[in-house]
Image: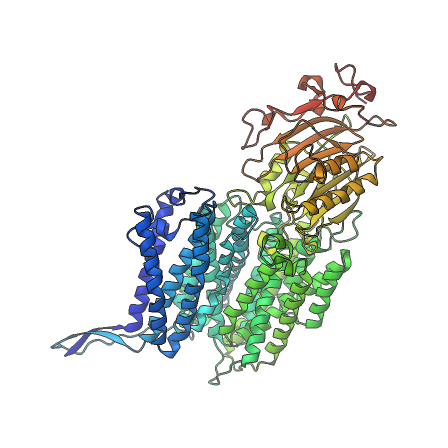
Amino acid sequence: MATVLTVPGWAIAHAHTTIASLAFGTALFAGWASGLWQELCINAVAKWPVEWFPSVSATGGWMYITSRDNHDLHDLFMIVYLVLTLPWMALSTMNSGKRAVKRRRIAMFGFIGTIPPLVWQFYRHSALRIPGAYTTYAFFEWSLVIWDIMFDSAAAVDLSEMSLQFVTEAARGEPKRKVERKDDWFGPEPSARRALLAWMSDLWFAVTFWTVFTALPIQLFYWSVWKLALAGTELSLFANIAPVLLTNAWCRRYAASRTGGEVLRGVMSVCGYGAWILPLPARLASVAIAVSAGWLGLAGTWVRVRGSREMLAEAQVLALGLVITMVLKHVNSSTNPFWCVAAEGRWSVVGMAISAAAVAELSARPGGGFPIAPVTREFIRATAAQQVAIGMGFGSLVHLIHTFATDGGTIISWTWTGFPVTGPTHSAACLVIAVACAACLAPAWWPVGVVGAVVLYRYPDWIGFVGGLALVWYLVAALPGYLRAMSLCPGAIGWGLLLYCVLGVVSVVTTAYAFVPFGNLVRERTDLVLGFSMACVVAGNVAAGRVRMPQGLLERSNRRIRRIKMWTSVTAVLLGLAAFATSYSELSTEAPKPYAETGRAFSGGIWTVHFGVDMAGRDSQRRMMELIRDMEVDVVGLLESDLHRFVYGNRDLTRVIADELGYYVDLGPGPNKHTWGAALLSKYPIVNSTHHLLPSPHGELAPAIHATLDVYGERVDVFVSHNGQEEDALDRELQTTEIARLLRATEEVPTVFLGYLVTHPGDQRPWPYQILMEDGKMNDIEIGDKWRWCEYIAFRGLWRVAFARVNEGDISDTELQVGKFVLPKPGATAVYESNEEMYWHVGEDDIPEVWRMPAMFRDEGVRGHRYEVWVGPLYYLPPVRSGLQRDGKGFIGE
């Protein structure tokens, strides 16, 4: 008898895993590709977009009888499936080999742990009939599929020593023995020019990695922002722990192979850049896959190189990729143009094309162009204690780099205190230069990092900024040592990144505590997150330094290290110069000019901009700029504007508007103040501004800005505030009481209030409306507008001549409100004698053109923006004694 074909047992298990994954994945993809996505999301309680992700049942990927075919029968078989699966998992685990038991237990406990929340969400959907609950249920249902497939995949371990053979009774000759191709890491060494090309490809993959890595949190947080609660999409953050798969020998071998490296980097590029064209749910999934592939591609190289000094060169390439993404954001008004959330997709096409060239180069690269392990037979591995310290330190290091070193403006926002300026403004280039210098294998002195973190946290302005530079320097300088040590303990990579995920969530909860169960435990405790992270980084740094590293390198490795160091240094200098040139170009010699330079009139607006992400999940900054420009708003308060957190992409929401239109900018309280942000942009010089944190004993912290402007040579005060939510009545009352106290302190000064109150017009105390208007000595801009709830404009000491509400389109969930005011004549005051006088409406023809609102937003408007509530703006004429009009028949200019 002769063997015709031998099929390894593990291959059968892998085939089962692949086919099962494709069955469900194909069903989900078919639902999207066929254009039926919205229909698949419809259920008996709600439809798209409240329900935005279909269940496994709806796609037909689980069983033949879907919930649409026969609801009751489907539920019966679903219950039978759950009941029978549990004993199957338990018995299979008990009868598995030692190596498979661990994997099966993880999957089994994951499956069991998913059932209670699955049942609860189904109860919320079917019994309580809560819209949106079925989408959450769907995620738990899909989780069951993943755990089930993961459990069955462990069969590959049990079957690894078995095979399926096909034999014949007679053989005509000896069967050909299958020759397994092995990666040739010792092939010919490339020339210097060819090595430069290989370095450029690796550098581009580093840029791609940082691009998709920083894009994932923005995309997943979209649902949390719109729900103001945990949405379930936060689980996609755990795409970062993909390197935990390297604890499996087969996965480790594949990720470290040439084929695996090419495939993983290709998947990262295709899913990362190609995500831009996909609809929201699929976009998130695509980016999550890209992040997983990116980490696996990096980690595969690390574990293959095993502690070689070439890991220092690999770290330089990764750090330089970080610098490039920082420069890309800096020159593009704080947004990475390659992000899948970018407003335009042309850069994603460019990224895809460059990645295709890079993958082609990688495939054709000579074996001598790759980093290799040390030429030693001695197997070196970190101790268990060292692995724990290094893993926790690595996760904390990634968290801190993501928090502070992915945008040049983040440290500025932490230390900004307002006007007059006593700290950094156009100094983002300093942070880019610090990271670029650290990427050139700078010494990682942990005392410098610790002192820098303390100084950044405790001190504002220049002192805090310098502390931030020291912190960022240390973090990036520590990366090479960490990566070299991590390459000796592959199991610690994934679990370290799990800590990164946890720290990322906790850092957000320090501000979002009001929307998360048990969130108050870490309310405003950024100090704990920063302190714990730094302690872990330092401990891991020390542990990494004590790991005995393998020695012995081929001369080609030494040449590669020298070349990469030289290329990195030259590129770092060029990037630093580019960042400096960009910062210098922002130092405009021309002061901002108001839209109306005559008539002593100015406009003020308030807009809650929903963190700069529109309903389609795209960056909305340029569309915001267009509406503010076309509405000719001279002074605008932006709420929900603090984007210098990793979940918002570490962006500066004011950059596009200020750069394109010319405004003085007060960023408001920074991320370390634990608010959602309030910013002020003004065409008029900001003489002085102070930041306030309003009383918030229960709910979220409320930020406020009190600014004094020089408007046509006269003082005008502007208040911008974002008071609490509907759920916290006491907070709203206390916050508005404090605002009213601040307003009374400058009662004689012409003042405009631009804020968020959460109250109906005319509500009596303790609702905020009466407190603000009466205690704060302010006038409502339009007492007849009964349709307001959150945004309000109030004024005093000025003649109000126009008011409009402009539909936000799909940029945000709240409209832009704009009022137009005129200063009283020099030496006079603006005081209305009655409500009739204050709220007397006139026609547009009764006021001068300089006081009018733009006409383009009448009727259907433009770009989805139009005047709402009324057919157009409301206009008012100052009384005769103002000296600005003659019986309503004309305007007397100055």
- Image coords of residue 68 (percent x, y): 33, 46
Give the image quarter of residue 170.
bottom left
Quarter holding residue 485: bottom right
Which quarter of the figure is the N terminus placed in?
bottom left
Judge from the rendering whether residue 145 lies leftward or rightward of residue 389; answer left or right.
left
Which quadrant is home to the C terminus? Answer: top right
514 left or right of 77?
A: right
Q: Whole-percent x and y of residue 237? A: 51, 59
Q: Position of residue 305 (x, y in %)?
A: 49, 74
Q: Residue at x 61, y 56 (%)?
A: 508
**Residue occupying the far right of the picture:** 827
Q: So how many labels did they put on this image?
A: 0
Residue 116, horizontal then vertical, whole percent: 45, 60
Image position of 227 (left or right of 107): right
Residue at the far front: name it: 127
Q: Is residue 770 above or below residue 289?
A: above
